[in-house]
Image: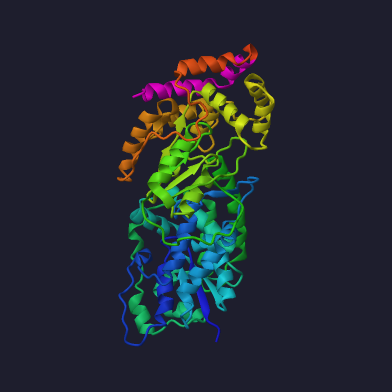
Amino acid sequence: MTRKAFFVIGMHRSGTSAVAGALSLARLQPGVETAPLAQDGADAAFDPAAAVMRLNDRLLHLAGGSWDHIPLWLQWEDFSSVDFAAWCAGSFGAVAERVWDEAFAASEDDVVCHDPRLALTLPMWLSIASSRGFSPQVLLVHRSPLAIMASLSRHDGLSFARAADLLADYWAEMLCHAPDDARVIGWERFCADPVATFEGLGLKGGSPDRLRRWVRPPAQAASLGVVPPPFMPRFLRDCDALLSSAHGAPVPQEAVTLAGRCLIERGDQKQLTGRTHLLTNARSVSAFNVITRRQRTVVLHCHIFKNAGSSVDELLKRNFGKRWTEVEFPGRGGFSNADLTNGFIRTFDQYDAVSTHTGDWWLGHDDAALSVRPIVFLRHPILRIRSAYAFERQQNADTLGARLAKQHGFSDYVKARLDIPGDLAFRNFQARRFAAFDDRTYTDVRSAAFRALERLPFVGLVEDFAGASQRMETYLKQDFPSFEAADIRANATDASHASIAEKLERALAELSDDVRERILAENAVDLALYEAAGQKYPAS
């Protein structure tokens, strides 16, 4: 006999736990008793498929979301919209299959999965259940929007506006993902008569007396606030009317149509308010911990080219060993890729320290589960450019920069780089990297970079590397007590003992008058940022 896999979907605080628990009562042996369900179904603690829930939650977090924040997902490569369920299947399908097998392979009974986040990932799990020989059955639990929002206010402190916004996200997603044979269960009518509800759906509900004792009618609605219909968003109002009349029946097609329109409208709203998150093309990830450490702290070295990054990396390797890694990310003409960095750090939780030349970081990505300790160094922009020239001139590589450096003297090399449209390497490059810390979509480099300088917990100066290393040790010891810094110099291109002023005078003298004027103008923000950093962190 084919086993069934029940997927109970619905918004948080809508009663999915109650329905899932009632379905599982049929599997209990006679005489086994369970505690009655709390009056608010959201309080039910029934958890039959915790691994599925954990993976859904994990996928949502590594994609820049959470149960109460659903961003608009966009493709990094072309900024087109992303089907999150398809992306999950493409990137973590093998992981999800392993989770399913470990949770249910040994069972000979029907299985029950419930999780509000299934609204976002349902197609992946339906496909896996079918491939394992299960017959999927989707039950969509509906509760009045006002009752859900009241419960979200009571338990989670959500305001009316935020609860309505979140509810619209979940309802639109679950209606668009529900298969044609999904059935609606009205929460209030289920509580009033769970036996009749299951009988109407052709489902076994176990002992009727046990089921009625376990499911108690919801509390009276006297504590609900008054929200006149015009104040309830139209999408919620219209879907509520359609779903309320569909108890025991398939999902009304009109509700699915409304949900499709709502997703388009909400996508436009989220783009307008910056509630987006970028994802790379789906690539299969096999090494993945479903249960990740709570409150992780990760050191992130944003390695700006020729800013003593190799020396910092050597320090991190000495202190973290195999818990350090280096990774690079694709770029798009200076647009922040901090979302990609965030995804990597959250996916590969075996690392406590990460270094990247190309990955940005946004300070707003930190949350209760992840704290990132950024490390970034500044250098006088003219000396950084001179160091880049010396490095590219001697390196054995066939890059554009290396070819130009070998073909030209310093002045002509700088001019050639500045003549390349869209080449930002010598145009306030450090300020642009700093700006990304403050805002994922900054519009003014200077203001964002200076805000980042004030907000960043650590900024080192290459010209005071020894002093910066000691500050770094103090900074990181609070989370990694064994961390020790040392004055390491790796990959240095100028080992002379000349002063900063002497090196700067020498570098500027190599430039023609017009190139000197041009490079100073193109790096005016970098120069101001470097000066401000020097005042904030005077040399030791």
At horizontal 64% and vertical 30% (from top left) the residue drawn is 423
* Nearer to me, 461 or 207: 461
Is 526 rendered above or below residue 125? above
Quadrant of the rendered structure where residue 15 is?
A: bottom left
Residue 527 % position (x, y): 50, 21
Count of numbered circles on the image: 0
Q: What type of secondary structure mainly makes up the magenta span?
A: helix
Task: Name the image quarter holding the N terminus.
Answer: bottom right
Residue drawn at x 37%, y 70% is 46
In the image, the segment drawn in magenta is 515-540
Residue 251: give x, y in percent of width and height. 57, 68
In terms of depth relative to the viewer, which is nearer, 76 or 251? 76
The structure residue drawn at horizontal position 42% and vertical position 37%, both measured from the top left corner, is 375
Does the image show residue 165? no
Q: Is residue 498 above or below residue 303?
A: above
User: Can residue 403 be spotted in the picture?
Assistant: yes
